[in-house]
Amino acid sequence: MFRPPVRLLSVAVAVLLAVSALGFGLIRAATYDEPTDAPLAGQQAEPAAESTGICGAVPARAARELRGMWLTTVWNIDWPSKKGLPEAQVRAEYLAWLDLAVAQRHNAIFVHVRPSGDAFWPSAYAPWSEWLTGKRDGQSPGWDPMAFMVAEAHARNLEFHAWFNPYRGTQPGPSGPGADFAKLAPSHPLRQHRDWAIAYPDGERARLYFDPGNPAARTFVEDAMLEAVQRYDVDGVHFDDFFYPYPEGGGNVFRDDASFAQRADKSQTRGQWRRQNVNTMVQEMSVRIKQLKPWVKFGISPFGIWRNRGSDKAGSDSRGLESYDAIYADTRTWVREGWLDYVVPQLYWTIGFDKADYAKLLPWWSALVKGTGVHLYIGQADYRVGESGAWSEPDQVDRQLTLNDKYGVQGSVHFSAKQVRADRLGAVTRYRDHHYALPALLPTMAKLPAQPPATPVATAAGRSDAGVTVQWQAGGDSKPVTWALYRVDGPTANLVATGRAGSQPVVDPTPPAGALTYCLSALDRSGNESALSGPVTVSS
């Protein structure tokens, strides 16, 4: 994100709190007035691929795109609504967020499970998160939220992506522990390994980081995240844009001299060495995740600018903070090397914004992923809707999603859940009705395991209070993970419902009146689809 040339002293307390919690990676350009003109310029590409098959005598169609939202736990931004709530209320609130995701026809959710050296599961590597328990003593709440979260997401056929902040060790003072070790839980790893900790920035707003240049700290951080992968049936491991801290200015220095002095390659500059440290962690996580569970996806949601063309001819047509230089995140290398399964650049600016034009950054990212096998999803700035300038236009995100389709983007993740629920200016309803009118299947990834199930058998269909129910059986000895239900609507059969394979019967919740024809397919863990079943009909 672009930062003002000088820190504005009059910024509202709420904005400062959000910045301290999320950094400038998710609180974007809040002080800029943007142009109202928003041209849809740029080269066009194909929209998301659609499934193929025949239902009766007509072709079947289903969008293939990821649709999700971030559920943020730090500072209780989204969930839980307060610290220290009773278990029953925490569970109920989470289920309400899943219900919202289903209502928006999402197929994935990204849940903040490691905000800052803590955990939303019983971990051998981190204390319990205070955003859940309300305390910093590391004491257990007496239940396992992660197991509950994953199971309930899957029950609604939502992918569960566990969202981790690798290097953050604390939240800044004075509200958070800051750099005061005495305020950390007794089991906090930075209290036990102070040589792993670096405080930044100076003063009362300091926070602790795991030193990315310390190999022991890096391995520990990786192990902490992989513990969750090993123990839970997560579908993805997800990082946001936080690596080395965003520069604070004012003479603040990230004091990693000790680990820099120990670098193996003495010819490296500090910037080169820091980028290598982050690259090493990203590459190692990529390898280790697939060693544990080859089907688990690994993705990162980086800051929306790698480098500007003015600094590097390979960069984008932009004039903003460069993540390559500012936070040592070489996102271009991660994509080109294939270390990621997906990348979700945070394009939190409007179409036509002069310093970072959505319509110019999008084609840069689209070109970057071409031929790499890395999926491109876009981080959408729902939280900015209603701000001055072009964000006051209720169709801004809607138009961005239209542009995404033209460049072959394979999905979107919306920041954040609370803004999706708020639906300011009716913007969410607008883009949902235009772009998410029907359910979507997740896009397949060629490098993930593929075991398409045998063709299922649809045995009967009938009307009920829930809609139209379709009975079915798996084909042969295959064990499908999910199902997809298609309904003939005139010249095509459209996807109308999806679910987990264990749910019987299949239900079309919104059937029209009259005689209807349905077909059903089965899918594996990676979204690879069987052939369609033979048709079944239900009378009016």
Image (spheres, rainbow, N blue to C red):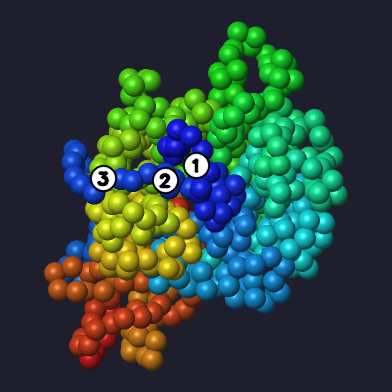
89 lies left or right of 65? right
Asked whether residue 473 appears in the rendered view, the answer is: yes
Under circle 3, the secondary element is loop
Which mark sits nearer the N-terminus, 3 or 1? 1
Q: Which residue is mark 2?
A: 31
Disc 1 marks which amino acid?
Leu
Q: Residues within 10 Å of mark 3 (few under 14, many from 20)?
A: some
Under circle 2, the secondary element is loop
- Measure how far apart labels 2 and 1 are at the Cα level: 9 Å
Residue 130 or residue 173, whichever sits in front: 173
- Measure how far apart labels 3 and 1 are at the Cα level: 21 Å
Q: Which residue is mark 3?
A: 35
Disc 3 marks which amino acid?
Pro
Residue for point 50% across, 42% down: 8
121 lies left or right of 186? left
Residue for point 50% across, 56% down: 70
Mark whose residue sits in front, 3 or 1: 1
Disc 2 marks which amino acid?
Thr
Q: Which residue is mark 1?
A: 8
Q: Residues within 10 Å of mark 2 (few under 14, many from 20)?
A: few
Residue 434 or residue 357, whichever sits in front: 357
Q: Residues within 10 Å of mark 1 (few under 14, many from 20)?
A: few
User: Residue 312's spot in the image, x, y percent?
Assistant: 37, 20
User: Residue 265's spot in the image, x, y percent?
Assistant: 64, 11
Q: Are marks 2 and 1 in contact (CB under 8 Å)?
A: yes
Compared to residue 247, the image places residue 383 above or below, namely below
Asked whether residue 405 appears in the rendered view, the answer is: no
